[in-house]
């Protein structure tokens, strides 16, 4: 039994925070990429009026970036440390976030 193996096991058992990220208004037809702490968690064209992405990430300060390549726009938001539901809206090319 090596300590290296136990280190790997501990990393896999890190606490996770779950986020339910809803794209609610203004994204239909847009190419959207969602990143949390530089990891891409969603990347595609939005075909519906609203959709939800559920993702679990390690407990830490989590930064959400909303990238819209066709609009040449990036918006960033600090996610609540306790996780939960986050709603994104796009009005007049400005993305806003509301946490619940």
Image (cartoon, rainbow, N blue to C red):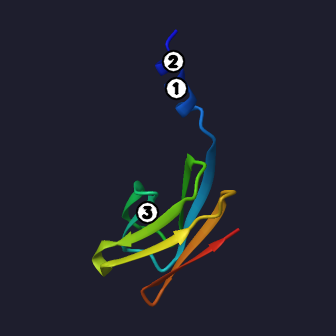
| Residue with the mark numbered 3 | 34
| Residue with the mark numbered 1 | 7
Q: Residue at x 62, y 51 (%)?
A: 18
Question: Taking 1 as reference, is 95 above or below it?
Answer: below
Looking at the image, which residue sits at the far bottom? 92
Indicate the position of residue 47 as horizontal and vertical percent values.
41, 67
Q: Residue at x 57, y 66 (%)?
A: 22
Q: How many marks?
A: 3
Classify mark 1: residues with Cα within 10 Å, few (<14), some (14-19) or many (20+): few
Q: Is residue 55 left or right of residue 82?
A: left
Quadrant for the C terminus, please.
bottom right
Q: Residue at x 37, y 74 (%)?
A: 29
Disc assigned to residue 63: none
Looking at the image, which residue sits at the far top? 1
Indicate the position of residue 75 as horizontal and vertical percent values.
44, 76
Query: Decide: marks 1, 2 in contact (CB < 8 A)?
Result: yes
Disc 2 versus disc 3: nearer the observer: 2
Q: Is residue 82 left or right of residue 48?
A: right
Question: Taking 57 as reference, is 94 above or below it?
Answer: below
SS category of the residue bearing label 1: helix
Indicate the position of residue 83 as horizontal and vertical percent values.
66, 57
Question: Which quadrant holds residue 69?
Answer: bottom left
Residue placed most toward the observer, 62 or 25: 62
Indicate the position of residue 53 as horizontal and vertical percent values.
53, 57
Residue placed most toward the observer, 64 or 68: 64
Disc assigned to residue 3: 2
């Amino acid at each position: 039994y090596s300590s290296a193996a136990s280190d790997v096991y501990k990393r896999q058992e890190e606490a996770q925070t779950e986020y339910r990220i809803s794209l609610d208004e203004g994204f239909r037809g847009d190419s959207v990429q969602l990143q949390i702490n530089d990891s891409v968690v969603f990347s595609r064209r939005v075909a519906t009026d609203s959709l939800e992405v559920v993702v679990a990430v390690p407990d830490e300060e989590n930064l959400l970036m909303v990238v819209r390549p066709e609009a040449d726009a990036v918006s960033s938001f600090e996610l609540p440390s306790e996780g939960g539901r986050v709603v994104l809206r796009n009005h007049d090319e400005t993305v806003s976030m509301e946490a619940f």
